[in-house]
Image: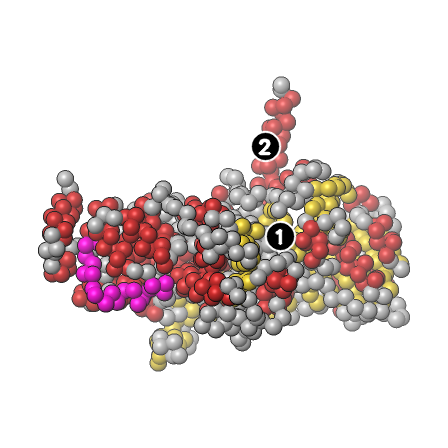
């Protein structure tokens, strides 16, 4: 099945988004679900990416990724009209959407992308949406305009104060939890460390909290178990039992270790890839 | 002329005259399987067993007594006419031998390699009975492989009935699905095989390693199906991309076969299983086989642990595959830890033998109690208990009983859990009305029909963990029933 890139945008220095043809997935997907992307069926690796949106009429899904290693760097080189290898999905259990009342949505970094369709669905279900978006610095903040259109209140924070408040997301989150009435639900998606600290904040105020985990996966259908994580003392598979779990129950510390299991190997592969690219450029310059 | 060839010539002369007596057949030495040297093969992924020569194959075939009642056939899940194809090999009629096999089995090059013949056809062999040694049975599996490999170049596409206008969905492209696809296509139906992975073949490509079943063989079988007009849709997850109901009600399929395997790895549920370095055998083998992690950094992009000391937990064929893969990936020491004794190991004798030859250290009557970490989230060691065998349990095997206070530690950096798979819940969860048992396996009748009309199932998702040939046997039954169902 051909997965042609219809639209491409660079959201920040290392974050890219595409609208890519995948009509069956566009039709079937629900908020909270993800796909597995592979660039090459012979030698490529399979990487899970959350679906940031879909257009069933055009038959496209929106993917957002951060350039962190060889495969994501290769993906970033692709342009409109290029084929995106293979895409399998939608995977994972969709977000449970209902009218909870007041929902605080917290997004960090690239986590804003998967958060967006969930926040939109929660809004459509009649919830009051208070959104907190965080980034290290202004240039890394993504999708704030999309969130502005669906949030009853939008708070932006950056680590360096270059946009919005100079704070971590936990700070406004805690203020919101202290308000009366307190939120009925917190939906938190971002780096593991951010989800961990947000969950610690909401735990204090007894605010139910959903986090969406992005662990290492191979098949994404429950077959390998590589994505497993301990939730409430039980082993869960992120790909089929998740990706969303009760943030108060997740063992984030061990999960972060597992996420970094191939860090050194991947770093080496990325360096080799970048080195090859540079050699390629030099060769062209010499012509 | 070599001694072997001379012997064959003498025997053939008598055989052709009808003078070869059973006593003389018993005296023919059983032909060993040529294999790569154990020290050499530790460093490559090439096939271990290299296959019979023509002389070996004919000598081995002459060992067959051609028993009237052919007890071997009763031991074969797909009832291959073993006596007849072996006789054809003895006569040098390889094409005929292949055709006889193909009447019942569609993947002889696969089955000849991975079937547990010693508990099937060869267990029933009269020659084995005579010697009271199953290893001395006529080597039916090796003969099957010999003709299949011989036929590699002269394979012919089976005849296909005129189009029926009926559409069949085959969910899962493993051995069972491949059989259903072939049989339904032969009957003239329009067949599409849906595969969740990016390559077809199921367990034959992600699970069974290259050194036991070269991927080129599986690819050839898949290509053969494509030549017949079977369509493959990879990266298609039935239950997610489309549901079974959608396929049948909206996409025009008239019948479906569910052969998705039992893809949900079991863990031991012991302390430390979330540590970095603990793998399910599924994950380890998928990374190594399908994703080619052995070429990481030299072409392939999927990494795998760089291990020095590996413990594999379990005693089945998958455990052997994982242990032998770890050796090839460069592990210095590989332990296989199994809680019963070697006699109870479910793995094939040949696999155990190969594993030992390759230096895998067997630790039987031992079982892990917990996995210890290094304080930084990585596996450091395994704490085990020693076991002894007690009274037989429900499976008829003597129950392993832990010896109190026998704890000891083994230093390892990688642990591979190979204790089997549960049923993957995806299809069940997304197919209302599909009856399942308490373990999540799909319930079928003797025709492999499920509780839903037009929906059939077989292989591991029905049987729990089974074998390639059992999945193929069920595929056979299901396809016959489906073809029957589609007549109306």
The single residue placed furthest to the bottom in the displayed view is B391
Evaluate whether label 1 is on the same chain as label 2.
yes
The label number, if any, that marks residue A88 in the structure image: 1
Left or right of B246? Residue A118 is right
User: Of B6 and A175, which appears nearest the observer?
Assistant: B6
Q: Check disc 2 and report its element: helix, strand or loop.
A: helix
Left or right of A193? Residue A287 is left
Quarter of the rendering containing residue A189: bottom right
The label number, if any, that marks residue A276 in the structure image: 2
Percent position of residue B39, x then y: 32, 47
* The stretch drawn in magenta includes residue B253: no
The local crowd at label 2, few if under 14, some if 14 to 19, many if 20 or more residues have their Cα within 10 Å, is few
Quarter of the rendering containing residue B28: bottom left
Percent position of residue B290, x then y: 50, 50
Left or right of A247? Residue A167 is right
- Distance, label 1 to label 2, CA atoms, is 29 Å
Residues rendered magenta in the picture: B60-79
Q: Residue at x 20, y 61 (%)?
A: B66
Q: Residue at x 20, y 58 (%)?
A: B64
Quarter that holds the N terminus of chain B:
top left
């Amino acid at each position: 099945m051909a997965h042609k890139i219809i639209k491409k945008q660079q959201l920040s220095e290392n974050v890219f988004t595409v609208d890519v043809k995948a009509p069956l997935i566009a039709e079937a997907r629900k908020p909270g679900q993800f796909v597995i992307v592979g660039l090459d069926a012979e030698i490529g690796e399979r990487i899970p990416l959350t679906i940031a949106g879909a257009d069933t009429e055009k038959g496209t899904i929106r993917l957002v990724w951060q350039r962190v290693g060889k495969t994501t760097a290769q993906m970033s080189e692709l342009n409109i009209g290029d084929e995106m290898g293979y895409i399998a999905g939608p995977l994972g259990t969709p977000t449970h959407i209902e009218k909870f009342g007041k929902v605080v949505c917290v997004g960090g970094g690239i986590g804003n992308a998967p958060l967006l369709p969930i926040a939109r669905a929660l809004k459509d279900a009649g919830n009051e949406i208070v959104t907190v978006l965080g980034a290290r610095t202004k240039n890394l903040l993504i999708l704030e305009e999309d969130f502005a259109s669906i949030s009853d209140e939008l708070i932006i924070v950056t680590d360096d104060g270059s946009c919005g408040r100079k704070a971590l997301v936990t700070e406004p989150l805690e203020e919101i939890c202290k308000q009366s009435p307190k939120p009925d639900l917190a939906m938190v998606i971002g780096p593991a460390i951010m989800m961990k600290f947000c969950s610690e904040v909401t735990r204090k105020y007894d605010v139910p909290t959903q986090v969406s985990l992005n662990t290492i996966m191979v098949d994404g259908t429950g077959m390998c178990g590589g994505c497993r994580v301990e939730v409430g003392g039980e082993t869960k598979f992120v790909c089929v039992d998740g990706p969303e779990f009760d943030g108060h129950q997740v063992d984030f510390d061990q999960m972060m270790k597992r996420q970094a299991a191939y860090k050194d190997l991947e770093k080496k592969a990325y360096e080799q890839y970048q080195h090859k690219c540079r050699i390629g450029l030099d060769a062209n310059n010499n012509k | 002329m070599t001694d072997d060839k001379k012997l064959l010539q003498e025997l053939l002369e008598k055989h052709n005259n009808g003078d070869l007596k059973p006593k003389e057949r018993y005296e023919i030495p059983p032909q060993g399987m040529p294999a790569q040297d154990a020290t050499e093969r530790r460093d490559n992924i090439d096939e271990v067993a290299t296959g019979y020569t023509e002389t070996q194959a004919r000598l081995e075939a002459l060992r067959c007594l051609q028993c009237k009642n052919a007890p071997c056939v009763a031991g074969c899940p797909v009832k291959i006419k073993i006596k007849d194809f072996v006789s054809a090999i003895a006569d040098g009629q390889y094409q005929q031998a292949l055709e006889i096999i193909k009447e019942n089995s569609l993947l002889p090059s696969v089955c000849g390699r991975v079937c547990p013949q010693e508990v099937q056809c060869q267990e029933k062999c009269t020659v084995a009975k005579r010697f009271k040694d199953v290893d001395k049975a006529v080597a039916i599996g090796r003969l099957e492989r010999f003709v299949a490999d011989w036929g590699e170049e002269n394979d012919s596409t089976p005849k296909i009935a005129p189009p029926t206008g009926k559409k069949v969905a085959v969910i899962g492209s493993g051995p069972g699905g491949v059989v259903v696809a072939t049989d339904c296509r032969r009957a003239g139906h329009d067949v599409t095989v849906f595969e969740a992975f990016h390559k077809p073949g199921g367990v034959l490509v992600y699970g069974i390693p290259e050194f036991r079943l070269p991927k080129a063989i599986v690819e050839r079988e898949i290509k053969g199906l494509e030549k017949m007009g079977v369509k493959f849709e990879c990266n298609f997850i039935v239950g997610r991309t489309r549901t079974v109901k959608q396929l049948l009600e909206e996409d025009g399929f008239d019948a479906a076969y569910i052969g998705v395997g039992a893809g949900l790895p079991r863990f031991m549920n012991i302390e430390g299983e979330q540590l970095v370095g603990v793998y399910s055998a599924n994950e380890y083998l998928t990374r190594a086989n399908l994703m080619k992690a052995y070429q990481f950094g030299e072409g392939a992009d999927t990494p795998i642990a760089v291990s020095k000391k590996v413990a594999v937990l379990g005693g089945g064929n998958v455990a052997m595959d994982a242990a032998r893969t770890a050796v090839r990936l460069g592990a210095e020491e590989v332990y296989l830890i199994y809680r019963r004794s070697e006699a109870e190991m479910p793995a094939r004798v040949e696999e155990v033998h190969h594993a030992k030859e390759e230096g895998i250290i067997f630790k039987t009557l031992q079982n892990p109690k917990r996995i210890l970490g290094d304080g930084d989230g990585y596996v450091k060691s395994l704490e085990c208990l020693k076991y002894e065998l007690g009274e037989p349990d429900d499976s008829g095997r003597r129950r392993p009983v832990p010896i109190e206070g026998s704890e000891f530690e083994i230093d390892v950096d990688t642990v591979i859990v190979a204790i089997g798979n549960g049923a993957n819940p995806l299809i069940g969860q997304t197919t209302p009305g599909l009856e399942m048992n308490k373990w999540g396996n799909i319930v079928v009748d003797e025709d492999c029909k499920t509780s839903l009309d037009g929906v059939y199932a077989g292989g591991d998702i029905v049987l729990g963990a089974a074998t390639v040939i059992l999945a193929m046997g069920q595929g056979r039954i299901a396809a016959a029933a489906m073809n029957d169902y589609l007549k109306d």
